[in-house]
Each structure stands twice: as structure tokens, then as C-alpha cells.
Image (cartoon, rainbow, N blue to C red):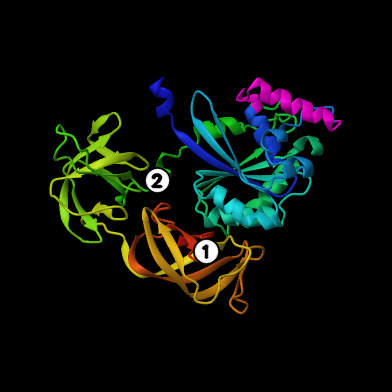
Amino acid sequence: MDNTYLDMELLRFTTAGSVDDGKSTLIGRLLYDSKSIFEDQLDQVENSSKKRGLDHTDLALLTDGLKDEREQGITIDVAYRYFATPKRKFIIADTPGHIQYTRNMVTGASTANLALILVDARHGVVEQTCRHSFIASLLKIPHLVVCINKMDLVDYNEEVFEKIRAQYESFASKLDVQDIRFIPISALKGDNVVNKSEKMGWYEGATLLYTLENIHIGSDQNHIDCRFPVQTVIRPKQDRYHDFRGYAGRVAGGVFKKGDEVAVLPSGFTSKIQGIHTMNGEVDEAFAPMSVTITLEDDIDLGRGDMIVRAHNRPDVSQEIDIMLCWFNNNGPMPRAKFTLMHACNEVKAMISKVHYKLDINTLHRNEEDLEFGMNDILRVSIRTTKPLMKDAYRKNRSTGSIILVDDATNETVAAGMII
């Protein structure tokens, strides 16, 4: 297999927007025009379109996999799609637009480098646009691309585009997002998705695919704070590697080099990096998001859930944690409920010690009175754990700043959170 393909940079992006803004159609168009669809898939979609009495191929059917989605013409679950061009590999999370599926959007967007925010050119910025943009900023997605869709229905009018752009920019000034771009498109007709539109000569920017292929994501990772959560200890029971003791995991931040002085948490012992091993042999340095095995000069007892960091740059270690939580379950938690909190490679027992406020996603208002919460609510809580966590703020490091809560009584994943 060609190694250059494996080494290509991976961009994860998510789609967000109101119902019927054309998210699924846009992804279908992206896959279709970039020739990333198998013929049998296309035949299936063409047949489904004919059965519905449509005179065109409904590309939205490429991503809507659930029967209910196809019948209602909406997206319910997060649909992941994979495609590649000669420049980059892509994983798309097509997330639902309905308010009752906020949790699905949080799930799909949590690992994204970029969010496509769709706006219907006829309606402009609506409540759902604001809600999804806010969630994208809460999840610290570094890049937002605002696709102003259905330009064919407003005669490809430049004024409409500029008006919506100004509308969005005035709202986005409240958000914590560094990079926002605007592209006028028609997902149905294919304008400015993969191919440049002939109908919008006034738009001089890049097409959507060109933007996705060329946007710089190398500096999205935290390359300053060194964090290496240990997933497992490797001890080959072979004569050739009799004394080998390696710590395997995925670099969550920073750059680790041979000879670096490191500290091991929670014990606090220090040592030096003896070697960094990968599938393709030894390397001199490792950085996020590489998966490697690190060996140390000293024989230190550490296992899954421990963390290797720089001696002079350590994460915060504590048992009281402030978190922005998105609640996934139909019911709120029982009083004094016990949870398993999953963080990096660590699992600890935990309980919610205090609810500070509930966030109204529509108005960004903090509700400190009504603290009852249920499915899709976003709230700020304090959580107490049985063991200290080695953590960073989510805005500094998305890997060491995120958690999942599992209910001990039902074994269900009930919430995901961002450490403040």
C-alpha cells in the first residue's frame, strides 16, 4: 500500500445549520463532484429519487442512512462519511439541525478541526445558526466556514450574500472563534462547492473544497504543553527484548524528544526519555496526534491512566473540577448519583457536587434559578472525583480538557464535558 496515502493530513469537519438548510445535500454534492462515490451507491440514490417522483438525483440520500431520516427528509443521528482527494483525507460528521438533537451535534463536533455552518440565503441568520455557532465556539472548533446556501433561489444576488455576512459577523463578535470564512454556494446546483460558479462572478474567493484542502490545521494542536497519557505498558516476553519496558499511547500535546527530562504523574518521579518507537521504527521526536511508545532511562512504576509530562510544565492536578456539561440522557441525575468519569486514559469515580447555572443556548443567558436539567441541556457544574485528575482547561487542550460521564447504575453515557 502506498505510504504517502497513509501519511496524508486528516481534516475532520462537521456540518451544522437549521433544518432544511441543505447540509446533507451539500455533503452529497461534495462527495459526488469530487468523485468519491461508488457507482452502486449512486444507482441506489438515483432509484430512491425516482421512487419519490423527483426529476433530479437527491444527493442528500447519500448521507441519510436511517430509514426515518430518508422518510422524513431530515438528519437524526450523526452520519460519519470518509473521503479523500489527492491533497487530504477527510472525515465528515453530518450532524442534525433539530434542537432536540443538540447532544448529537456535540458528539459529532467534539473532534472537528472545522465546522461548516449552513445558512439559507432566503432566511439569513436564524436562531439555529446562532445556537450551532455558539456550540462550535464552546467546543473550541478553530475554523468556521459559513456556507450561504441556496443562492440559486435568490438569483445569485451579491447584496443578499453581503447582508447575511454582515448579520453573521455582528453576532460572531460575541464568540470565541479566530477564523471565520464566508462562501456563497448552491449545494443543489453545485455552485462553489467543488467547481467555481459561473453565475457568481462577483465572488473572488475559493470554492469550498479548495478551502477544505488548503486551510492550515497544523497549529490547531497544542505543541507547547507536553502531555502523554499512558494507555498501556508494553513488555514483550521475548529473549530479544527481554528488558524492554515501553509506555504506549497517543501524544495529547507538545513535542517529546529523546533525552528530554520528564516527570511522571501522579507519582511525580522524574526521568529522561530513552527512546521513542513507532510502527515504522525509532524516531527522534513525537508530537500530537502521533501514537508512539516511549521508553524511559529509569525503571519507574507507571501504568494506564498515568501521564508523562515535562518536568517544568505540569497540568493541574485536583479532585474538584469545574466543567461545562452537555447532558445526554432523557432524565436528569438522581440525587447523590455515582458516576464513572473518563478522562484521557483514566477512569475515576465521581459525583456532581454543585450545579452553578444552566445555559440558555438561544439567548446565552445563565439561568441560576431553575437548576433542574435533562436531555440536551448545557450547564456549568462542579464535580468531585475519588482520585486527582491530571487536567488542562479545554481551551488549552481538547484531549486533556474533555471528560465523559457514565452512570454507574445504568452503565449509560449520560454527559460529555469541557473542563473550564
Q: Which secondary structure, mark 1?
A: strand
Seen at 72% across and 34% down, the residue is 61
Seen at 43% across and 45% down, the residue is 220
Question: Is 219 displayed left or right of 189 in the figure?
Answer: left
Question: Which of the 4 image quadrants contains residue 62?
Answer: top right
Closer-to-camera residue (96/22):
96
Q: Is residue 360 above or below residue 299?
A: below
Q: Is residue 254 above or below residue 36?
A: below
Amino acid type assigned to the residue bearing label 2 in the image: Gln
In front of the other: label 2 or label 1?
Answer: 1
The circle on residue 40 is none
The x, y position of residue 7, in whole percent, is 40, 28
First to last magenta residue range: 32-53
Q: Is residue 265 above or below residue 236?
A: below
Seen at 81% across and 37% down, the residue is 153
**Is residue 48 part of the magenta span, yes or no?**
yes
Question: Is 237 displayed left or right of 345 in the figure?
Answer: left
Mark 2 in CB contact with mark 1 (< 8 angstroms): no
The x, y position of residue 289, in whole percent, is 37, 42
The circle on residue 221 is 2
The circle on residue 325 is 1
**Callout 1: 10 Å neighbours few (<14), some, many (20+)?**
many
**Callout 2: 10 Å neighbours few (<14), some, many (20+)?**
some
**Is residue 190 part of the magenta span, yes or no?**
no
Amino acid type assigned to the residue bearing label 1 in the image: Leu
Which of disc 1 and disc 2 is earlier in sequence?
Answer: 2
